[in-house]
Image (cartoon, rainbow, N blue to C red):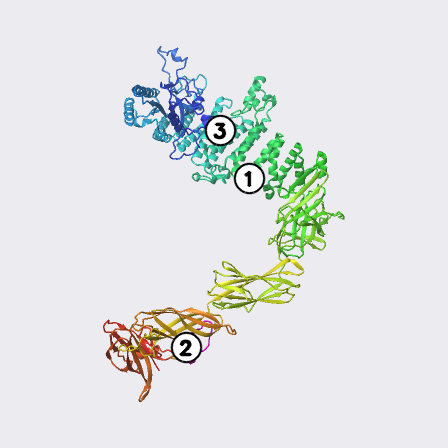
Amino acid sequence: MDAFGDDYIAHNLPLLFLSGLGSSNSTRDPGHRHPAPEGGFRVRTDLPPLESDLANVVKDAFLQHDGSLAPWRTPPVSSRFFAIRNVGRSYTLPPRKAPPPPHSPRLSAVDNGGGPPPALVLHSPLSPLTPSSPLYPDGVLNQQWIAKHQHHLPCAVVMFLPLSADAHTSSLLDNKIKSEINSAKAALSTANYKTRLVVVLLGDEILSLDDVEDRIATIRRATNMDQKALYFIAHDSLPQQASQVVQSLLGSLYPQCIEYYRDLSKHARRKRNRNVTPQPTIPPASAHVLASQGWVVRYEFKLGVFGEFRQEMDAACRNYETAYDSLFAAEMIESIASWSPRFHEARLLADTIALRILRCLLWTGQTSAAVRSWTNHQERIEGLLDRRGKGTENYGWQAWQHTWSKTMAELLTRSELPGLSVTVPASDSLVFLKPDASAGERFTPWEHLHHQGYWLRNAQEHTKERRKLAATIPDEDRHPPGRSPASKLTHTAESYDSYLTLEPYQELPADGTTGFDYTEEILVSLDAAIEYFDKKGQVRMNELIQMKKASEFLNTQAWSQAVQILQPLWESPVWRKSGWWRLLECVGWALLDCANELQALELIVRLTWELANSCFTARPNTIYDLDQLLERFAPENKLSIALNSQEGTGRIATSFAFSTAQGHVGELIDCQFVLSSCSNTDSSAVSLSGVKIVFEGSLKPIYLHPSDSATTSKMAVSTADVELNEASPLSSTGNKRSSVGHIASVSGPANLTLAAGQTRIFNMQMIPREAGDVSVASITLMLEIDRLSLTVTNSEVEGATNDWWEMKGDIPVPRAVGTQRVVSNLHVLPKPPKVEINAVDFKRSYYTNENVEINIEIVNNEEETALPTVRARLISPVNGAAKIRWADQGDDEATEELDIEQILPPRKLDSLRPGSKSMLSLQMSETVAALDHELEIVVTYNLEADTESVLQKVLTLDLAVIRPFEANYDFAPRITSETWPNYFAPPPASPDIPSGLTQQFLVTANLFSFAIEPIDIEAILLTTTKITGGAICSSTTGVLRDETLTEPAGLAEKISASIAPEQTRSFNFDLTVQKQVLGDRHTVALDLALEIGWRRPGSNGVNSSILEVPRFVVPMAEPRVLVTVDNKASVPGQEDMKLMSLRYIIENPSMHFLTFNVAMEASEDFAFSGPKANSVSLVPISKYEMVYKILPNKRDTEGSRERRKNRDAKGEWLKVQLNVVDAYFNQSLRVQPAGGGVRLDKKGGVVVLMD
């Protein structure tokens, strides 16, 4: 963009002058490059400039808001950018009007009437109406007008003055400050500019706040300054505080500056709307004046520039577009002769307006519209030159296209668009931006905005065309003006376009001197484009541009630089994987030419070896034979070159395949090695001196050497069997996993001579000695000739081919193995063990508290005698869940316990002959919890014929331990046969004999089986584990309960019961509780346990399982009512009617006199004899018995229907309700059944069984 001029391309910002902060900075002050025009208004302050530290801090704070180098995009809301210029104590404002001409007709002529001529109309010194202006009389605009507003005419001036703390001179200095401020205001007023004046007072020492406020107020009144136009910064202000004052000043000043440029826009708009062509100061003598359309261009351009000053880029864009369209009107640029300097001025203005339109469109995010605008301007200029100019078939047009393409790249760089900026990580992968949503129409792909590399690549293409067209300039047109006749100069001026470029004699001088450096320009553009393409990850485009750069070096015969570029491209795998062989071929031959020029023998050998491949086109007169090739160069020493197949395509392709995916140790494995020649037909045969195949794994390396008896074969595909023999060990260095280290190789002879297009297949057999994975690590081809030692290594054999060659007739045919396996990989399995491990009589599950014995049988199915060792390990879910040991394990053999594992000491067995067996037993005990265990049996053995090979057999058993039983319990009171002691005549007390009351209970255990097989119960006991409350307890052995009996079976019914899976069996126990001391009122609590002796069917061993019983609480000092059915007799004369006798016993075990109210409820379901209501008084420790005769009613009543409905297997049940109420406490006592034939119903009432 520099070709168009700094003022034309720069973005316009509000201009701010800093007056009084030291001298102007030449590096940042553009006034040194743009001196003020003569005749301006000079503003000067007599006070010396401020050079203190505070002044420097304030100056730096202002310069931080200088946006001259800011990106061309919308700034943050908090940012207020200015174009800041430090002007010192004096500066000159440009004049508003030009002075009268020195030879004005007004001074020498008079009108026809003898009077003076009319007054002259003076205009701006930069106006085309002023004779002294370079635009006079028909120019449109130049850079001076933009420089006037951007560098010399500020919208605001910030004057810095000192505020002294010296009491002796402060008054005098304050008056001087007032005078300087008034003088500056007067000068600005005289110049008739609306420039805003702001004063900043800097303290030189510490001042009191009241004194500062009074002095500032006095200065403000004397100078009539606005409150926001006078600021003070204390001497001891920190840099942050000074920066805050500067931000506040610029924040309040920015709207006023914008308004200043808005007033200028209004003034220009009013002049445009007059539609009147102004009269010049002096009419031109011969040339015509600027047309009205030219004034439209001028005013619209000014409006666009003022819009940029206001940062209103959308409004500025509309003004620029109007100015651009007006400039290309028929009466403007179309009417200017191409030989006239005004034509170049108009083109420069058109380029400037187009550039500013592009900046506005990029600023507002209209990226696709910007590309279209760039293309439209290019096409419009091309049409203009073809119609009115010197055409486009010349180097000048290509030079302009180079400049225009580079301009777009520089615009993108300054704009820093989020989508294309290389500094934004998220946009690294974006090559071009999508069309803007506001476009409203479809765009072609090339109208999408691409990154800078695209435009720089176009720029270098135009430079190449420029060089090509410049070479067609005749010699007579390339001489300087002093050596050519005037006619030749005229012809040259009319034939060549020198706009923004060199003249023909400078472009390509005929005397051989240096003209335009095309190579330098092309390389600079290509380097910049490569940088952008690389940052965007466009690898292929980057490499393509690298080729263009190398081509440029080849044109200039810069062989070394060309090699530095071409060699990485040649070695890059991207083109090879993509199959770009034609491009790769071009690179290879060009690189070979460079290598020949540089005499780089190693590079020549590498290239010749690969270019002989049939995928490249053979070049005539090329020597492919390496021996003949080296004879041309005759190297002093023998070359040693190592090549890698992954870095390029060679003359020979290699592959290796195993016949199967799996094999076993000690078994033969068939494998194939294939050599295929990829040479073109112009290449000679290659005789290898050796081939080395190295494996990753346990296989020995293979070394193939040339066979002495090999015959020359012309068959395209041939097979041969290679017998491998043990060779000398290789180097002992290397990876332990690699077959190179510490392993002797195997070798065999083979025919290693291949002509072009031949394929040789070598069949071999190998025996793996260790288990594991085996793969081909590398295949190395060795070629030894007189002047060269060449090795070609292929370290990526996997995936090269997946074929296995088979013979069909006499012709080898490849068979595709498929993608299920990789033929170059082999999984070697251990030799399968033939020793069996059997668990004899192993159960599906075992039970808690069972003594488990597991028998392990070892069977030798090997053909030789085995020497086995047995190891056992038990893994439990939790620690201590079980114990395991060998059945014959002694006390001196300890079991190793590791958290949840138990490892038994190994058992070394005697030698097992083929077919023999051996038995071991394991015992597991203390299985108190129901858990799943894992038992691992490992047998390791050697064969007598091969003691070094260790074979192993593993058996894993899942031991499921479950609970065999669960139980619930019922407690029922019973009437004891013992008599109670007399309260009034107690028996003699003895400390050894319990004297308390006795109560008896019937305990029923309902046992449910969780076993998976029937279990025989040998014995069942109810034991007491704990008694509290001062009592003793005893119980009987469990008796199997017969559900058909109403009364429990006696001792004679004790049996050994068998319980089936998921079956419930009930057992009865008589429980007797007696207090130790008579009259003890403490409650008795019993902790009981149910101990079961059981065994598996057919087993003699009895196991014991203990189940917990819920705590049983006996309140032995509380009164209770018991009921029994004593007998049932027939009614005389009615045999079908049974008379039942109910015996109620009221017990008072307490030491108190108790009275009870007893009442029998009448019912229609039965008749009774006995007291209807009675009052019973009981002395302490006494019983009272009441007998009722009950006769059931057989008639059809509601109660009888209910009895029949609830009838069970035993019969019908009759409800009898006896109410017993404590007379003192008014509490009812619950009647409790105490024998067979009577029970409680669901509601707690007593029901009696009817026969």
Q: Give amino acid for label 1.
A: Val
- Separation of marks 3 and 1 at Cα, in angstroms: 29 Å
Vertical side of 111 occupied by 240: above or below: below
Whether residue 43 sits left or right of residue 721 in the image: it is left
SS of the residue under disc 2: loop
User: Do we see residue 524 in this rendering?
Assistant: yes
Q: Nearer the viewer, residue 413 or 220?
A: 220
- For label 2, the crowd category at 10 Å Cα-Cα, with few meaning under 14, some 14 to 19 and many 20 or more, is many
Closer mark to the observer between disc 3 and disc 1: 1
- Which quarter of the figure has residue 486? top right
Closer mark to the observer between disc 2 and disc 3: 2
- Image marks 2 and 1: residues in contact by CB distance under 8 Å: no
Tag 1 or tag 3, which sits nearer the N-term?
Answer: 3
- Which quarter of the figure has residue 988? bottom left
- Image marks 3 and 1: residues in contact by CB distance under 8 Å: no
Give how far across and how far down residue 629 sits, in percent: 71, 37
Vertical side of 191 occupied by 986: above or below: below
* Magenta-tinted stretch: 1049-1066
Q: Give amino acid for label 3.
A: Met
Which residue position holds label 3? Answer: 1
Residue drawn at (23%, 74%) of the image: 1223
SS of the residue under disc 1: helix
Whether residue 377 sits left or right of residue 1193 in the image: it is right
Closer mark to the observer between disc 2 and disc 1: 2
Tag 1 or tag 2, which sits nearer the N-term?
Answer: 1
- Separation of marks 2 and 3 at Cα, in angstroms: 114 Å
The dot on residue 539 is 1
Residue drawn at (56%, 39%) of the image: 540
Whether residue 301 sits left or right of residue 571 in the image: it is left
The dot on residue 1041 is 2
